[in-house]
Image (cartoon, grey):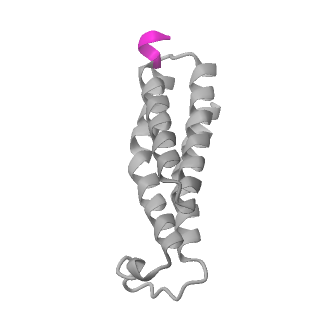
Amino acid sequence: MPVAYWCVLIAALLPIVWVVLAKWGEPIKNQYPREEVDDLPPHKRRAYAAHQNAYENFPFFAAAVIIAVTSGAPLAAVNGLALAYVGLRIVHGLCYVGNYSTQRSIVYALGWFVNIAIFVLPAVG
């Protein structure tokens, strides 16, 4: 199985990491978990936002990897770009939690461009 597919699994699990960080040690009632987010400390609200952002960005990444691999793109390139994307998404989440907004935006844009590169790789590879 290509490394890129393992990266899809990691990217699918990343939102869970951020939500655990957001809710760890907080008195959250699971009946209304989204309503209590506004009461969290700022860094935990940012972790929750990173959680949502990770879910929002996952479908495009998963689709890009599947399209690239099944369309015959060079596997080494897909794997390398997928690893770069996952690394950027981890850094993005850390910037989100740490309140480094400018760096977060830069890392987000880099991840977005890497994802586009994965998607178009079959056409140019």
Does 123 appear in magenta?
yes
Q: Quadrant of residue 3?
A: top right
In this rendering, is residue 20 above or below 99?
below
In this rendering, is residue 38 above or below 46?
below
Check the picture and name the quadrant holding the N terminus: top right
Residue shown at 45% from the left, 38% from the top = 61
Q: Quadrant of residue 105?
A: top left
Judge from the rendering whether residue 84 lies leftward or rightward of residue 37; answer left or right.
right
Looking at this view, is 19 or 102 the one in front? 102
Residue shown at 41% from the left, 77% from the top = 37
Judge from the rendering whether residue 73 lies leftward or rightward of residue 84; answer left or right.
left
Q: Magenta part mainly helix, strand or loop? A: helix
Looking at this view, is 113 or 76 the one in front? 113
Question: Can you give x and y, in whole percent of width and height, for residue 42 in the image?
Answer: 48, 73
Q: Quadrant of residue 81?
A: top right
Looking at this view, is 69 or 93 the one in front? 93
In this rendering, is residue 44 above or below 83?
below
Residue shown at 50% from the left, 16% from the top = 72
Judge from the rendering whether residue 25 lies leftward or rightward of residue 69; answer left or right.
right
Residue shown at 38% from the left, 51% from the top = 56
Question: Can you give x and y, in whole percent of width and height, for residue 99 in the image?
Answer: 52, 60
Question: Can you give x and y, in whole percent of width and height, for residue 120 in the image?
Answer: 41, 20
Does 49 appear in magenta?
no
Q: Seen from this angle, which residue lies furthest top?
A: 124
Question: Can you give x and y, in whole percent of width and height, for residue 58 in the image?
Answer: 44, 46
Magenta-drawn segment: 121-125
How many numbered marks, from 0 up? Answer: 0
